[in-house]
Image: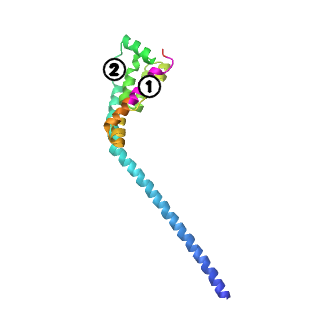
Amino acid sequence: YIVYFIFSQWNVAICSKIKLYNSYLDMRKRRTQGQQAAASGALQGLRACAARVIPALLPFFVVSRMLTALPLPTPGRRADRLFRALFGVRAACLPALLTGLLGGYPAGAAAVTELYRAGALSKAEAERALCFCNNSGPGFFAGLIGAAVLGDVRRGLILYGLHALSALLTGLLLPGSA
């Protein structure tokens, strides 16, 4: 009877250690599967970015850099009065507005910053211009949202038109016009 008791205790100890080891192996297997799923998802995201996002946005990045680098003619007094009446800023903001509407997010803000550094806009005008010159570009809406997400470029362009209209309305409706 004592031998049976010792053997059964030994058997229980061995079985529990085997179960514990199997649990450990299952946990490692699940963790490895989770890591593989994460790596697969990251790779799929990078492929989608290379196939859809970069080709859709690259031309607009290039054009926006060209717009900010080119010296544009200074708008006249009439344009200056019109911009002050509509947006509360000088017409020198026009290149930044066009760059923001055509080039996308960082381009509009960068153009406003360059105009401020060049002295074409005061600090208050630059802060105000950032509210309506910093927008998503048509490449984002048509190429990525329209074509890749919605499957229809026209829908993306409609969304872009609404986005551009909201940016212009923001500039018009901001309190404190000059």
Which of the 4 image quarters holds residue 137? top left
Give percent across and percent down for residue 148.
34, 42
Along the line of sight, which residue is nearer the eye, 81 or 62?
81
Q: Amino acid at mark 1?
A: Phe
- Residue 120 percent location from the top left of the image: 42, 18
34 with respect to 68 (left or right): right
Tag shown at residue 132: 1
Is label 1 in a helix, a strand or a loop?
Answer: helix
Residues 175 and 123: in front is 175
The magenta region covers 162-176
Label 2's element? Answer: loop
Asked if the residue under mark 1 is in contact with the one under mark 2, i.e. CB atoms within 8 Å, the reply is no
Q: Residue furthest bottom?
A: 1
Q: Position of residue 172 (x, y in %)?
A: 44, 20
| Residue tagged 2 | 72
Residue type beneath disc 2: Leu
